[in-house]
Image (tube, rainbow, N blue to C red):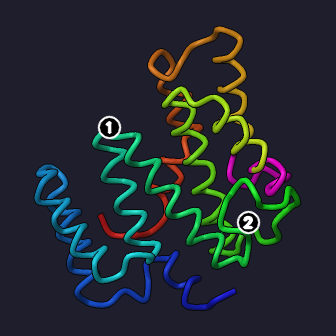
Amino acid sequence: MDADFDAAVLGQGLPTAVEAALAEAGARRSEPVLAMAALMRAQSLAPDHPAVLIAFYRHHFYGHRLSMARDVARRALVVGAQALRLPVVWREVPKRALPGARHDAPTRFFLFVLKGYAYLSLRLDDEVEARDALALLRALDPDDCVGAALLEAVRQRALAGGADAEGDESVYVQATGAAAWARLPAAA
């Protein structure tokens, strides 16, 4: 593992200009155009930094642009996979437990991003992506350190004709990878 990536997942190691751009994006979150301009500045300076990806994800997610949030999750999956020396296409990642699901920053980053991706796929009615991402997540994290079991239960309930994302938002909020991403330390 790369110690720099560990620090990056924790919101550390940002160049001052990137930190300032992310802080501005956070301060301007009620002004989406100005927040996006700040995020674009941060991205131009540190395109693959986890803190920048997390900030973009949050911006799109909380702005209800779920498809765009999922696109960010796809990019973040590649960054996380590279840090873990995994195949960059998530569907090609071997279905075996990843060590460090409780404490290793790059592993947790990858798992939370995969969970967020599964959640967004579910919300976007992309059942195959949601199912497959959750199956991989369960294989990578058999102890359920990131809480994929709840999201899988919600998916199963929806398949059985239970409440959907709009009808049972409180369960989705508990199950969402977005909420998990929101707990990762990063500006914005």
- The location of residue 56, given as percent across then percent down, is 35, 60
**Residue appearing at x 55%, y 37% in the figure:** 121
Q: Is residue 112 magenta?
A: no
Residue located farthest toward the right when viewing the structure as drawn? 96
- Could you give the CA–CA distance between mark 2 and mark 1, rounded to whole angstroms? 30 Å
Q: Residue 150 — which label?
A: none
Q: Residue at x 17, y 60 (%)?
A: 35
Disc 1 residue type?
His
> Would you name the residue on which mark 1 appears?
64
Residue 145 painted magenta = yes
Which quadrant is the C terminus positioned in?
bottom left
| Vertical order, 140 against 107 (above or below) | above
* Looking at the image, residue 64 lies above or below residue 162: below
Majority SS type along the magenta span: loop
Residue 169 relative to residue 144: left or right: left
Mark 2, Cα crowd under 10 Å, few <14 / some 14-19 / many 20+, is few
**Residue range of the region highlighted in magenta in the rendering:** 137-147
Report the amino acid beneath label 2: Arg
- Up-down relation of residue 148 to residue 95 (above or below): above
Identify the residue at horizontal 57%, vertical 31% (top origin).
126
Residue 75 picture location, percent across and down: 50, 62
Q: Earlier in the sequence, mark 2 or mark 1?
A: 1
Residue at point 82% right, 70% down? 99
Residue 131 in the image: x percent, y percent? Answer: 71, 35
Q: Going by the picture, which residue comes out furthest to the top?
A: 161
- Secondary structure type for disc 2: loop
Q: Which residue is mark 2?
A: 102
Can you give x and y, in whole percent of width and height, for residue 20 in the image? 21, 80
Residue closer to the observer: 79 or 6: 79
